[in-house]
Amino acid sequence: MHSIRIPKDMNNQAYFITLTILKWYYILDRHGRWNILLNSLKHCTKKKDIKIYAFVFMINHIHLIVQSPDVSGFLRDFKKHTSLEIMKNLRATEPSVARLFEGENGKFNIL
């Protein structure tokens, strides 16, 4: 997903954020993937200074309303960790679907 850079002086505001799965593929609704997202959000609220006001998980995207002193840092870490976990899940449960997100040299792109 392409993102708009958040200016430093606005990094601590509340934001409505939408994260989409590459090419809007429907992958989040099965094999415990919503739990992966929820556990990642729970981890962020415990370990990072972030407030999650609302979230909605859909089959191919996520909506969040969040506030943090470092929103861009939260997004970076959340996307990296969740993508890794979802890719592990895809490889274990749906290897043919996992190949849709794999690029060269073992790299992949999901969120």
Image (spheres, rainbow, N blue to C red):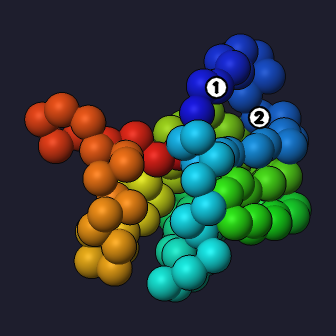
Q: Is residue 41 above or below residue 73?
A: below
SS for tag 2? loop
Q: Quadrant of residue 9?
A: top right
Q: Could you say which disc has been placed on residue 3 in the image?
A: 1
Q: In screen coordinates, is 27 left or right of 109?
A: right
Residue at 31% x, 63% y is 96
Q: Residue at x 43, y 54 (%)?
A: 83
Does residue 25 appear in this view? yes
Residue depicted at 75% across the width and 65% down the height:
58
Outermost residue, front side: 96
How far apart are the two marked residues, 1 and 2, measured between alpha carbons? 17 Å
Q: Is residue 62 above or below residue 95?
A: above
Displayed quadrant of residue 55: bottom right
19 relative to 88, above or below: above
Question: Which residue is disc 2 drawn over?
Answer: 12
Give, as a three-letter code, the residue at label 1. Answer: Ser
Front residue of 100/72: it is 100
In the rendered image, residue 106, in percent from the top left (x then y), is placed at 16, 43
Rendered location of residue 41, percent (x, y): 62, 67
